[in-house]
Amino acid sequence: MRLATSVPGARILGLGSAQPEHVVTNHDLAQRVETDDAWIRSRVGIVERRVADEKTSLPDMAVEAGNAALADAGLAPSELDAVIVATCTMPNPIPNAAAQVATALGANGVAAFDLNAACAGFSYALAVAADMVRAGSARHVMVIGAEKLSDWIDWDDRSTSIIFADGAGAAVLGPAAEAEQVGVGPVSWGSDGEAAHAIRILGDTTNKLHQEGQTVFRWATSAVAPVALDAIERAGLTPADIDVLIPHQANLRIVEAIAKRLRAKGAREDMVVADDITHSGNTSSASIPLALDHMRTAGRVRSGDVLLLVGFGAGLSYAGQVVVCP
């Protein structure tokens, strides 16, 4: 039996993102539920979020982000070998998003599958894609985190309507010919099914997302930092080597708590911390690549920076890895 030729590892070649044009502010939500701008900012740190219209589908946003990532990488669709879409909000389980997205990108015939690890989905998919490239199963893999959470939100439920939003972010991975070029570190991942009830789609006639906010907050502020530290150690680095922290944009207070714990373990005071949730809301599996692309565009992340990505959410599932910005 002959195996594919392996390479030392994978690296990110290009990034892209997409968001709906429609902006929903805290003031807009206050017209529907009992809340106000100050309360929302103090609880979750969100000022506004993007919500797609009925005509815009999840695959539509994924394709837009994927096209941007291909252009950034300087690759043609024909050079892709696989498309992975991390998502938990497709309207139907069949057909999957990835096959539709691959064809729309111009890569019909490639391997295509969805991956559902909720808010940890992008980090999970990135790890799978990197292993595919390293093992020789694929040369170029498109990884997209895409969500249309607005389809699953009860807009009269203050606990969820103020948090979640829509969008997509993408990364193209390719081979690192030399060990020094490897740009995606080993993954640190896991799950806690005993707390699966904390974030779920209610199995009743409403079919809407339900979240036990305090349970999730306590878990995230205590359990995520150790995962991040383990990812750093697996990459052979120390917290002081991290230039930028990009955790899942669940809640600004959670993001700040993770950063504080990493700094207590040696991360630098000048480590840049993603705060994309302020204007994008919580976009589940899309939040990490959205934040990364937005920060790079704004000049807050530069080529060669060492980034720590860490996703966490429903499942409960979590995953993190160190990557190098393209």
Image (spheres, grey):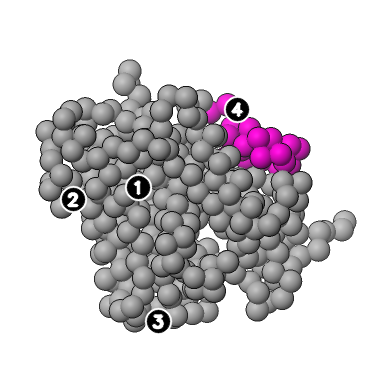
Q: Which residues are magenta?
A: 93-116
User: Mark 3 belongs to which amino acid?
Assistant: Ala
The single residue placed furthest to the top in the displayed view is: 205
Q: Is residue 237 above or below residue 326?
A: below
Marks 4 and 1, the one that precedes in the sequence: 4
Query: Which percent across, then down, holds residue 44?
Result: 22, 50
Q: Which residue is mark 2?
A: 41
Mark 2 vs 4: CB contact within 8 A = no
Mark 3 vs 4: CB contact within 8 A = no
Marks 4 and 1 sit apart, C-alpha to C-alpha, by 28 Å
Magenta span has 95? yes
Marks 3 and 4, the one that precedes in the sequence: 4
Query: Which percent across, then down, holds residue 24?
Result: 28, 37
Please say whether residue 35 is visible from this viewpoint: yes
- Structural crowding at the residue carrying mark 1, measured as other residues with C-alpha within 10 Å and reported as few (<14), some (14–19) or many (≥20): many
Query: Which percent across, then down, holds residue 102?
Result: 66, 39
Marks 2 and 4 sit apart, C-alpha to C-alpha, by 38 Å
Q: Is residue 49 above or below residue 205?
A: below
Provide the secondary structure element on which disc 4 rests. loop
Could you say which is closer to the camera, residue 274 or residue 199? 274
Q: Which mark is residue 280?
A: 1
Marks 1 and 3 sit apart, C-alpha to C-alpha, by 28 Å
Q: Which residue is mark 3?
A: 240
Marks 2 and 1, the one that precedes in the sequence: 2
Marks 3 and 4 sit apart, C-alpha to C-alpha, by 44 Å
